């Protein structure tokens, strides 16, 4: 009987320790970068200058935005964005990808696709700059009336309110500069005009909550610009921001004043997260005692008259 030794099988096994595992395709990074380049060009072509508040200009041959316009609106260098769209092997931070995604008006799946093509870990909760809510959420906060309720994002932008909220905080309209941000309204008025009574107790907590969210958005142009502008407008905010304190949002009893109310109004605020709107929350205010309930009822009657 003859014995045949097949050494080449052992050698092949050493070269491929997992023979049943599908072989990884070669040049995968190159194909990924090429797909990234094509994806960015296609998304850029569908956004018009009018979509981002820019004049159309003359002799425009590009169907959508130009590369330099995307770079300017995203707060990045023209050369860097050009290289990104050309599929060159450059590193992109989550903050920059978020800025580009906002400029190109990418939805959730498109944003995740952008992250995957750029080989950056995707964090679904980064979409905190939502500027509007749907009729379903508006209907929920309207149904909470006569209790005041609003929708805030992580930067304290006011995305939606019900009528009772506008009464409680004496907000005639949300079209004035800074009116759509709670912090801007609280820090850019005198202490006498501030609707929060215990200003030195409540405002530091709000700034600490803002900083807690800021950690997820460090370097993003919209956030950096907001902090810079509010620091310039309010030395008190700048002082609190420099402290570096961090706090999460949570239920609190806050005391407010209203020019049409006879006394102080103590309200319990509760934050509720919203599925589908990452980092956004419904904040509802309920009277903390009978006297405050009477004050709120008086404001409601005043509105109805």
Image: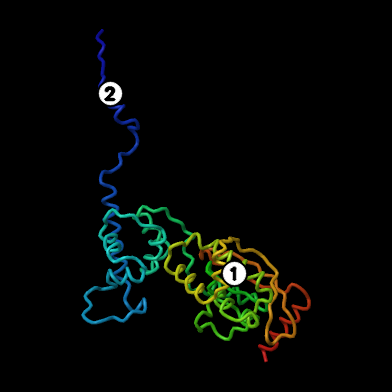
Disc 2 packing (10 Å; few <14; some 14–19; many ≥20): few
Between circles 1 and 2, the one closer to the viewer is 1
Q: How far is disc 1 from disc 2 in space, using C-alphas? A: 65 Å
* 151 or 169, nearer to the observer: 169
**Badge number at residue 282:** 1
Disc 1 packing (10 Å; few <14; some 14–19; many ≥20): many
**Badge number at residue 43:** none
186 left or right of 18 in image? right
**Badge number at residue 9:** 2
Task: Reply above or below: 249 against 302.
Answer: above
Report whether residue 115 is seen: yes
- Figure quadrant of the N terminus: top left
Query: Residue, x 43% and y 63% (percent of image)?
Result: 219
What is the residue that sits farthest to the top in this orientation? Answer: 1
Write down the quadrant of residue 17 in the picture: top left
273 left or right of 4 in image? right
């Amino acid at each position: 009987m003859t014995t045949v030794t097949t050494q080449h099988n052992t050698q092949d096994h050493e070269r491929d320790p997992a023979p049943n595992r599908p072989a990884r395709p070669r040049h995968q990074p190159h194909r990924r970068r090429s797909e990234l380049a094509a994806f960015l060009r296609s998304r850029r072509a569908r956004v018009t200058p009018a979509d981002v508040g820019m004049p159309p200009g003359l002799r425009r041959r590009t169907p959508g935005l130009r590369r330099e316009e995307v770079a300017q609106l995203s707060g990045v260098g023209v050369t860097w964005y050009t290289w990104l769209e050309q599929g060159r092997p450059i590193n992109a931070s989550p903050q920059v990808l978020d800025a580009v995604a906002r400029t190109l008006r990418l939805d959730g799946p498109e944003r995740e696709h952008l992250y995957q093509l750029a080989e950056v870990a995707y964090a679904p909760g980064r979409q905190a700059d939502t500027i509007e809510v749907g009729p379903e959420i508006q209907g929920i906060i309207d149904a909470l009336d006569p209790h005041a309720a609003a929708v805030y994002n992580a930067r304290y932008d006011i995305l939606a309110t019900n009528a009772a909220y506008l009464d409680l905080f004496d907000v005639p309209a949300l079209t004035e500069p800074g009116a759509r941000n709670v912090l801007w309204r609280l820090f850019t008025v005198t202490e006498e005009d501030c609707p929060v009574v215990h200003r030195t107790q409540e405002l530091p907590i709000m700034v600490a909550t803002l900083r807690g969210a800021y950690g997820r958005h460090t370097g993003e142009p919209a956030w950096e610009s907001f902090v810079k502008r509010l620091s310039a407008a309010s030395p008190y905010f700048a002082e609190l921001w420099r402290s570096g304190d961090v706090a999460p949002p949570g239920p609190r009893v806050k005391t407010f004043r209203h020019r049409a109310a006879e006394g102080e109004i103590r309200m319990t605020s509760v934050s509720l997260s919203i599925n589908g709107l990452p980092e956004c929350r419904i904040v509802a205010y309920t009277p903390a005692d009978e006297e405050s309930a009477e004050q709120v009822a008086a404001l409601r009657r005043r509105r109805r008259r």
